Each structure stands twice: as structure tokens, then as C-alpha cells.
Amino acid sequence: MLIRTIGKGGGVVFGGEFPGMVVVITTKGSRVRLGFQGHLDLPIINLKLLGKIICMELKNNLFHEERLALRSMLVLLEDPQSNTAEIIDLLAEPVFVELMYGPAPDEE
């Protein structure tokens, strides 16, 4: 995890297939307002909402491996600062790719 101290107006960019940028808009006490700008194909979802989406998905009929991955993510989301690398790795699993991007188009 990259950790930086950045003041108002500062930010970071990230690249690769889906480039984006995070900018500090304002700070107030211990709260920080961030602005996110990313490639249209890059979903940006806050962790609390991701947890709610996973809980809803667990109500569906899933394969054992999918259910296991979703439950694992819920456990990791309880302490995201300590589990950042594991969360990122798990987001690459097919069940999360489909959850974030939708079902893959049928290959013919």
C-alpha cells in the first residue's frame, strides 16, 4: 500500500489499463473529502457499499467457490487497512469481476 500525506488540492494518479486520479477536495478534522476520476470501465465503489452488495449477492444461488470468496471478502472488509493486499487480490477473482463489471459476454 502506498501511503502519502497530501493536503488540500493534492492527489495521486494511477495508471495501467484503467488510469485514474484521486484528489483531496477538502479536509475537516479527521474527515477528508476525496474526488475520484477514472476511466469509464473502472468501477469506483466505497467499501461500505461493496459490503452491502456482497450481502445481497449471498442471497442468490451461488457455487460453493463463489460463496466462499464473497464470505472471505466480508471478513477482510472488517479491517480494510490491515487487509488491503488481500482485498485487491480477491477483487481479481471471477466472482468479483462479474459483480463489479457484470457478466462477461458469451464467447462464440
Image (cartoon, rainbow, N blue to C red):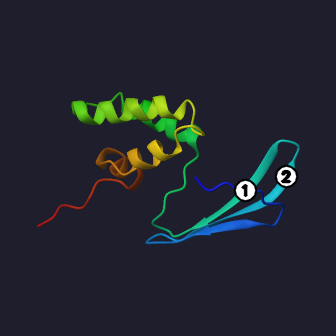
In this image, 31 relative to 61: left or right? right
- Position of residue 59 relative to residue 90, above or below, is above
In this image, 26 relative to 49: left or right? right
Q: Quadrant of the C terminus?
A: bottom left
Q: Residue at x 83, y 60 (%)?
A: 7
- Position of residue 48 relative to residue 94, above or below, is above
User: In the image shown, does 95 or 75 lie closer to the viewer?
Assistant: 75
- Residues at marks 2 and 1 touching, judged by CB atoms closer than 8 Å: no
Which element carries disc 1, helix, strand or loop?
Answer: strand
Q: CA distance from mark 2 to mark 1?
A: 9 Å
Q: Residue at x 57, y 37 (%)?
A: 82
- The circle drawn on residue 27 is 2
Q: Which residue is mark 1?
A: 34
User: In the image shown, does 64 or 75 lie closer to the viewer?
Assistant: 75
User: At which x and y percent is residue 1?
Assistant: 58, 52
Mark 2: which amino acid? Thr
Quarter of image, res 4: bottom right
Quarter of image, res 78: top right
Mark 1 Cα shell of 10 Å, populated few (<14), some (14-19), many (≥20):
some
